[in-house]
Amino acid sequence: MSLMTFETLVVGVLSPILVLLVTFVIDMAKQRRAQQAAMTDIKSALTKLEENVKTLESMVAKQEEIANKHNLEEVEARVSLIRDRIVQAHTWFMNKGAIDAYSLQALEKMYEIYAKTEENSFVKRLVADISGLKISEE
């Protein structure tokens, strides 16, 4: 094989293969850089998402705290209203000397609810006083 033939072979056959190989390697490098950039973007998005989740968790916890405080205040207000109503009923019915069955039943139900949240011997004594009254027909 002559030198010319060898040169022709190298230039004619191997050059296109080398061009293809170089192009392939360059494309692979570009794809790898694109994948790395995409992974960086994904990691950044996940970090932001985690931060947002933490913020939302904090906001939910604060709302739960506010709701619990509100519920506690509402329960305290209702207990106070029941206590006030029992005190008023005690004064009224003790002065009257009797109580009708419906009013007694309503007061006992109120005390039943009250006793679930408050242990107050004062109110318990008031209900006991009222329960000891004569039952009227009114």
Image: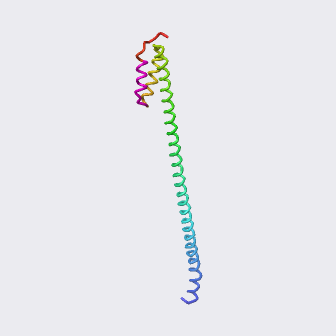
Kindly identify the residue that appears in the image at 50 percent across and 39 percent down: 69
**With respect to residue 40, does 7 lie above or below?**
below
Left/right placement of residue 102 relative to residue 14 reads left
Nearest the eye: 130 or 102: 130
Coordinates of residue 126 in the picture (x, y in percent): 43, 22
Left/right placement of residue 136 relative to residue 32 reads left
**With respect to residue 44, does 2 lie above or below?**
below
Magenta span of residues: 118-130
Kindly identify the residue that appears in the image at 49 percent across and 36 percent down: 72
What colour scheme has been applied to the protein in the rendered image? rainbow
Nearest the eye: 48 or 12: 48
Quadrant for residue 6, please give it.
bottom right
Coordinates of residue 53 in the picture (x, y in percent): 52, 51
Residue 136 within the magenta-colored segment of the rendering: no
Residue 120 within the magenta-colored segment of the rendering: yes
**With respect to residue 93, does 75 lie above or below?**
below
Coordinates of residue 124 in the picture (x, y in percent): 41, 24
Nearest the eye: 85 or 71: 85
Kindly identify the residue that appears in the image at 48 percent across and 15 percent down: 95
Coordinates of residue 66 in the picture (x, y in percent): 52, 41
Main SS class of the magenta portion in the image: helix
Residue situated furthest front in the rendering: 95
